[in-house]
Image (cartoon, rainbow, N blue to C red):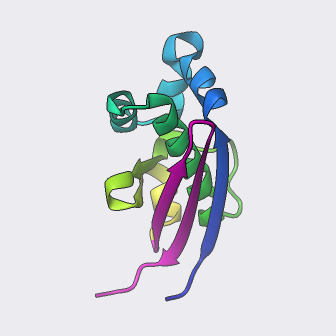
Amino acid sequence: MSIHGIGVDVAAVPRIAHLVALRGGAVAERWFTPEERRRCHADASPSRAYAETFAAKEAVWKALGLRGWDGSVPWQWIGIVPEEETAHLTGPVAEAAAALHVHVRTSSTEAVAMAVATASPVTPR
């Protein structure tokens, strides 16, 4: 198996919880997909779930290494699917990374969430 890229990120749980609560949740709506918000709200520790998801999105973005990308990180186009340990890419990110599969693992404490993502070429079956 060859690896296209590896991404690692760490997020402070209290900081992400504060940002998610800003402006009545507007930040959460901009950064997280509806499914991610539903899953995080349903978690026993929503703050940790949001921080893990945020760290995972950052790690995925780093692992993809999309050279020449103009603009900000397209958070809504990177969906984290923890039960499958993958990222679901949509929109222009999916087009730019069509030949890649992304594997994601997360872990957290009450204070810190971390994620590691690996992007590897999709192998034909």
- When the figure is inspected, residue 21 is found, relative to residue 73, above or below; the finding is above
Q: Position of residue 100 (x, y in %)?
A: 47, 72
Q: x, y percentage for residue 29?
A: 47, 25
Q: Quadrant of residue 123?
A: bottom left
**66 vs 3: above or below:** above
Q: Is residue 76 left or right of residue 22?
A: left
Q: Tell me what residue is drawn at x 39 percent, y 38 percent.
A: 36
Residue 114, horizontal then vertical, whole percent: 60, 51
The tally of labels here is 0
Q: Is residue 91 left or right of residue 56?
A: left
- Part of the protein shown in magenta: 99-125
Q: Residue at x 62, y 72 (%)?
A: 5
Q: Please say if 1 is above or below 83.
A: below
Farthest residue, direction front: 110
Task: State the residue lying farthest toward the left.
Answer: 125
Residue most toward the top? 24
In which quarter of the view is residue 98 placed? bottom left
* Nearest to the observer: residue 40 or residue 26: 40
Point 59% across, 47% down: residue: 55
Residue 102 drawn in magenta: yes
Q: Is residue 19 above or below residue 106?
A: above
Whether residue 33 is in magenta: the answer is no
Asked which quadrant contains residue 125, the reply is: bottom left
- Principal SS element in the magenta part? strand
Residue at 40% of width from left, 61% of height from top?
86
